[in-house]
Amino acid sequence: MVELKQKGATVLFSTHIMEHAEKICERILLMDKGKEVVYGSMADIKAQYGRNAVQMEFDGDASFVAGLDFVESVVSYPRWIEVELKEDADPDALFRALAGRLRVRRFETVAPSLHKIFVRLVGGEEERNVQA
C-alpha cells in the first residue's frame, strides 16, 4: 500500500484501528453508523481537535497520573500513555510530578491520537473506557 502511494496512486484504506490510519493516511474520513463525523487532512483534524496532550513511555506504575488535579484524562497503551491535560495546565507540571516516581523514557507534547479524537466526537462505549 505504501509503495502504491509513493508511485502517486490514490489508495482507499478502511480500518477500525485508528493507529494504522494515523500512521498511513494523509486525509481521513471518520464515520460512525454510516454518517460522516469528520473529514480532512490529518494535520487539519489534529489542529482542529487538538488539545494539550503528552505522550510518554516509561518504566514503573503510572496509575497515579490519572489522579493528578491538572490531568483531564489518560489513555493507557501497553508500553506508553497519552495524557490530556486540562485547558491551562503546563506539561512541565506533569513532568515534575513524574520525577522520582517513574523512569521516563520519552516525554513529548503532542496533538491527541486519532483514536482519542474519534472517541471525543463519537462517544459511546469507548468513551466510558477512557480513564478520567
Image (tube, rainbow, N blue to C red):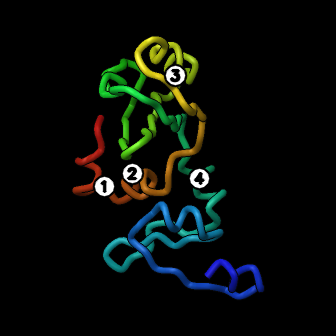
99 with respect to 77 (left or right): right
**Which of marks 2 and 3 precedes in the sequence?**
3
- Which quadrant holds the N terminus? bottom right
Give amino acid for label 1. Gly
Describe the element under mark 4 as helix, strand or loop: helix
Describe the element under mark 3 as helix, strand or loop: loop
6 with respect to 84 (left or right): right
Distance between the alpha carbons at the discs numbered 3 and 4 = 19 Å
Query: According to the image, label 4 marks what residue?
Result: 46
**Which of marks 4 and 1 precedes in the sequence?**
4
> Dot 3: within a 10 Å radius of its alpha carbon, few (fewer than 14), some, or many (20 or more) residues?
some
Q: Residue at x 39, y 76 (%)?
A: 35
Q: x and y percent of residue 109 in the render?
A: 60, 35
- Which quadrant holds the C terminus? top left
User: In the image, is residue 43 above or below residue 9?
Assistant: above
- What label does residue 123 carry, if any? 1
Give amino acid for label 3. Ala
Query: According to the image, label 3 marks what residue?
Result: 89
**Which of marks 1 and 3 precedes in the sequence?**
3
**Which of marks 4 and 2 precedes in the sequence?**
4
Distance between the alpha carbons at the discs numbered 3 and 2 = 19 Å
Describe the element under mark 2 as helix, strand or loop: helix
User: In the image, is residue 50 above or below residue 90?
Assistant: below
> Dot 4: within a 10 Å radius of its alpha carbon, few (fewer than 14), some, or many (20 or more) residues?
some
Distance between the alpha carbons at the discs numbered 2 and 4 = 12 Å
